[in-house]
Amino acid sequence: METDLRKYQKHKSTAKVRGIDFNLTFDEWLNIWQNSGHYQDRGRGKGKYVMSRIDDKGGYTLGNVFIQLNKDNVIDACKGNDWNKGRIHTEKTKKKISQGLKGRILSQEWKDKIKAAGIGKKKPPTIITCKHCGKQGAMNNINRWHNNNCKLKEFYND
């Protein structure tokens, strides 16, 4: 099992890789986690807690960190940070993209690839008949509710 010191060192090294200053001593780091009451719930999954920085700015220092749900940390990170810019298109950008695609001529090769892949074509359901009651319908429904599961199975097999 991973020791507390190892968890601290791992956090410190990942901060370094991300280019973030990490100025907490082991005792400070552990004290923050223990005071939060969520030390055992640390992690990156659903319902887990992380050590966050205020507004994701500055380093990991006393007074600039707090413990919160991983989900909330991700939501905070998506709000207006530089790495998120360009992921959500404004209406103006959407219109510009749309205009750029209008009137575009597709090569015959491209059309053939789309046709071969069957993109955009809905396949009609395979229609079959229940062998017991004669009801017709899509294969998945008839096999689920009829054939071997038909309520009238015993009446029509006499």
Image (cartoon, grey):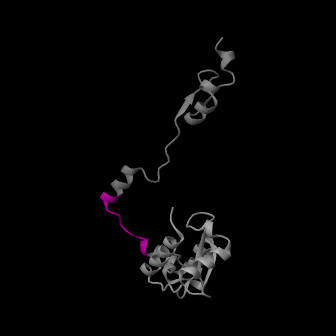
- Which residues make up the magenta segment? 100-110
Q: Is residue 112 above or below residue 31?
A: above
Which residue is situated farthest in the left direction here? 109
Q: Residue at x 65, y 70 (%)?
A: 38
Q: Looking at the image, which is closer to me, 49 or 133? A: 49
Residue 79 visible from this viewpoint:
no
In which quarter of the view is residue 130 placed?
Answer: top right
Q: Looking at the image, which is closer to me, 113 or 107? A: 113
Q: Position of residue 12 (x, y in %)?
A: 48, 78
Q: Is residue 58 left or right of residue 150?
A: left
Q: Looking at the image, which is closer to me, 7 or 59? A: 7
Task: Tell me, yes or no, whether the highlighted magenta stretch contains residue 65.
Answer: no
Q: Looking at the image, which is closer to me, 99 or 46? A: 46
Task: Quarter of the image for the C terminus: give it.
Answer: top right
Q: Position of residue 126 (x, y in %)?
A: 52, 35
Q: Is residue 15 above or below residue 134?
A: below
Q: Residue at x 60, y 25 (%)?
A: 147
Q: Position of residue 79 (x, y in %)?
A: 59, 80
Task: Tell me, yes or no, whether the highlighted magenta stretch contains residue 106.
Answer: yes
Q: Position of residue 13 (x, y in %)?
A: 44, 77
Q: Is residue 113 above or below residue 39?
A: above
